[in-house]
Image (tube, rainbow, N blue to C red):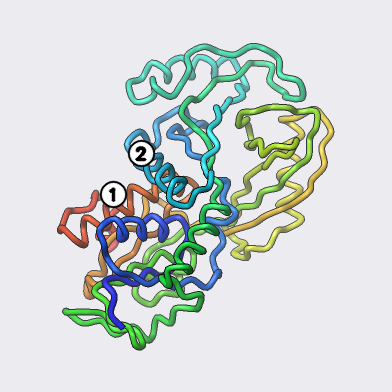
Amino acid sequence: MKVDYIIVGLGLAGLAFAEELIKANKTFLVFENHSQTSSLVACGVYNPVVLNKFTAVWNGAAQLEVAMSLYGALEKKLNQKFDDKFLIKRVFKSIQEQNNWFTASDKPLLQQFLNPNIETKKRPGIVGDFGFGTVNKTGRIDTLKLVGAYRSYLSANNWIRFEKFEHQKVVPSSESIRYNEIECKQVVFCEGYGITENPFFNYLPLAAAKGELITIHAPGLNIDFLLKASVFVIPLGDDLYKVGATFNHTDKTATPSAAGKLELEDKLKKVLDIPYQVVEQFAGIRPTTNDRRPFVGLHKEHPRLAVLNGMGTRGVLIAPTMAKALFACIEKGVSLEVSADIARFQ
C-alpha cells in the first residue's frame, strides 16, 4: 500500500494537518489508538489575549484568522456546529488592574480585542467588586464533538486505523518511509504527550501538565459569557458551566483526582457566591513546552519524519497555523519560524 503521508495521532494538530493534505489532494492514513485525551477534554477556548498579564498572544491575531477559517470550513463539511462565539469578561481584583487594562487596550496589537470601557454593573452570583473588562472576538470550539465527528469522517473514507502505531517498525530511507505493508513519503507525529515514547523525537523537552476540569450545575448564575478570574467559568447551556483548570506537573495520569476537584472548588468559592452542584469531572495531559512555543519540524537525520506537537493550552488557536507551516515546509521548503522549529533543540 502506498500513500503520501502517515499521520500518527488525531487530536487538533493531526486533524488540522489532515485538512491541509486533503486540500492539496494528498493521500494519507491516520493511526489513532485513543491513548491521548488532551484534545478531547480541552475547553477549546480561542482567545488571543493573555489575561493574567493583559498582553497579546504570540502571533494571536494571525492565528485567530487561520483558525476561524478552518473551523468554519469544517462546520460546512461535516454539517455540524462546533463554534460557540461568546465574549470573555475578566474580573478585576483591584484599581491597579483596571488601570493596566486601560493601558493595554490602547496598544495596537490589542485594540481590536480589548474593550476600553470597564463594566461596573454588579452581576448576580459573581464576586466582582472592581468590575469587569470585556474581550471581543472570542469563543469556544467543542473539541470533543469536532474530533469525534472528524474521526467518523475519516473512517467512512477508510483514511484512519484505530490501532497503536509501533515506532520500532518504521524503516526510514532517503527516498521513502516503510511501515509494515505501507510505503509513504512522510510521517507526521501528532501524538501529544505520547511523543515521550517516540524514539525519534523523545529528546524534545516536553513539559507536560495535567489539567483537570469540572462541570457544575448553577441555576442562579445565568451568564452567556466566559468569566475569567482565578478559574474560568464557561457557559454550556441548561445552567451547566465548565470550570477549570488545574496545572499539575508531577501527576502524569489522565485520571480525575479528589485533589484536583478540591483545588477547583476552593478557587470557585472566591469567584461565585451562589450554590452549585458538581456533576462531572475531567482530566487530560497537556503537551506543553518550557518556552511556550510548539514543537514543529523535521528530524535532523531522517527528514521524512516530522513532528507537530506541543500546542499547549492554546491548541485550538495555534494548531491550524502550525499545520499550515509544517505542510509548507515539507512540500515547498518554506522555512519554519525559528521560535517554533525543533531545530532550536538540535
Mark 2 surroundings within 10 Å by alpha-carbon count, few (fewer than 14), some (14 through 19), many (20 or more): some
Kindly identify the residue that appears in the image at 43 percent across and 52 percent down.
311
Kindly identify the residue that appears in the image at 51 percent across and 75 percent down.
162
Counting from the top left corner in percent of width and height, residue 97 is at 54, 20
Q: Which mark is residue 339?
A: 1
Front in this rendered view, residue 290 or 153: 153
Which comes before the other along the chain, label 1 or label 2?
2
Q: Is residue 291 in sight in this rendering? A: no
Q: Secondary structure at mark 1?
A: loop
Front in this rendered view, residue 270 or 140: 140
Q: Is residue 227 in sight in this rendering? A: yes
Relative vertical location of residue 97 with respect to residue 341 in this rendering, above or below:
above
Mark 1 surroundings within 10 Å by alpha-carbon count, few (fewer than 14), some (14 through 19), many (20 or more): some
Relative vertical location of residue 299 with respect to residue 208 in this rendering, above or below:
below
Kindly identify the residue that appears in the image at 40 percent across and 59 percent down.
309
Residue position for label 2: 58
Quarter of image, res 177: bottom left
